[in-house]
Image (cartoon, helix red, strand yellow):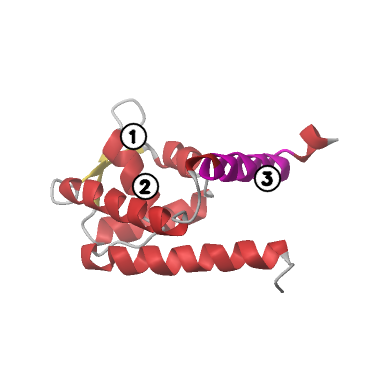
């Protein structure tokens, strides 16, 4: 398995998820909710569709995530003025202060993961991951 890139990437993702969940447990948040909280922290009043695009998850996944977050008092929904079928999603006042602390916890995990990498190696890692994502999302670009 030490030469299987797919296995290594899967194992790295699992390690990251476990570590992030552990750091976020005191806040009552899971790592899957963090990108949504960060997006709403930057700009509240987004629709579910907008969040799906920014967080890069499917609608059913986002719907379940938002349902849990609303149940747990992390977010609120308000009907759109222009289209009553849609709602705008906001952080609750109680949640807003936690977002910065959660981002700091996320950054601690990334710092731990990249501790043995130079800034140049970290930049290369970012670029390689971006290229791999692009290759899988847009296979027609690679022909």
18 is within the stretch colored magenta: no
Q: Quadrant of residue 115?
A: bottom left
Badge 2: few (under 14), some or many (20 or more) residues near its Cα, within 10 Å?
many
Residue under the image location 52 percent in, 68 percent down: 14
Separation of marks 2 and 3 at Cα, in angstroms: 23 Å
Disc 2 is placed on an element classified as: helix
Q: Which residue is mark 3?
A: 132
Residue 61 in picture, x, y percent from top left = 48, 56
Q: Are marks 2 and 3 in contact (CB under 8 Å)?
A: no
Q: Which residue is mark 1?
A: 84
Q: Is residue 18 rendered to the left or right of residue 124? A: left
Residue under the image location 50 percent in, 51 percent down: 117
Disc 3 is placed on an element classified as: helix
Residue 97 in picture, x, y percent from top left = 16, 47
Residue 102 in picture, x, y percent from top left = 27, 53
- Majority secondary structure of magenta residues: helix
Residue 30, numbered label: none
Residue under the image location 61 percent in, 65 percent down: 10
Sequence-first disc among 1 and 2:
2
Residue 99 in picture, x, y percent from top left = 24, 48
Sequence-first disc among 2 and 3:
2
Point out the residue furthest to the top here. 82
Stretch in magenta: 121-138
128 is within the stretch colored magenta: yes
Disc 1 is placed on an element classified as: loop
């Amino acid at each position: 398995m030490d030469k299987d890139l797919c296995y290594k990437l899967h194992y790295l993702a699992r390690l990251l998820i476990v570590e992030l969940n552990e750091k976020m447990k005191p806040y009552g948040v899971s790592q899957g909710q963090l990108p949504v909280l960060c997006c709403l922290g930057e700009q509240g009043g987004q629709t579910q569709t907008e969040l799906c695009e920014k967080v890069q998850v499917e609608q059913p996944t986002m719907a379940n995530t938002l349902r849990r977050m609303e149940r747990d008092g992390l977010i609120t929904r308000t009907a759109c003025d222009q289209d009553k079928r849609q709602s705008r999603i906001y952080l609750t006042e109680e949640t807003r202060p936690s977002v910065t602390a959660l981002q700091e916890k996320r950054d601690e995990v990334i710092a731990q993961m990249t501790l043995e990498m130079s800034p140049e190696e970290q930049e290369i890692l970012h670029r390689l991951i971006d290229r791999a994502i692009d290759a899988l999302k847009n296979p027609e670009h690679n022909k």
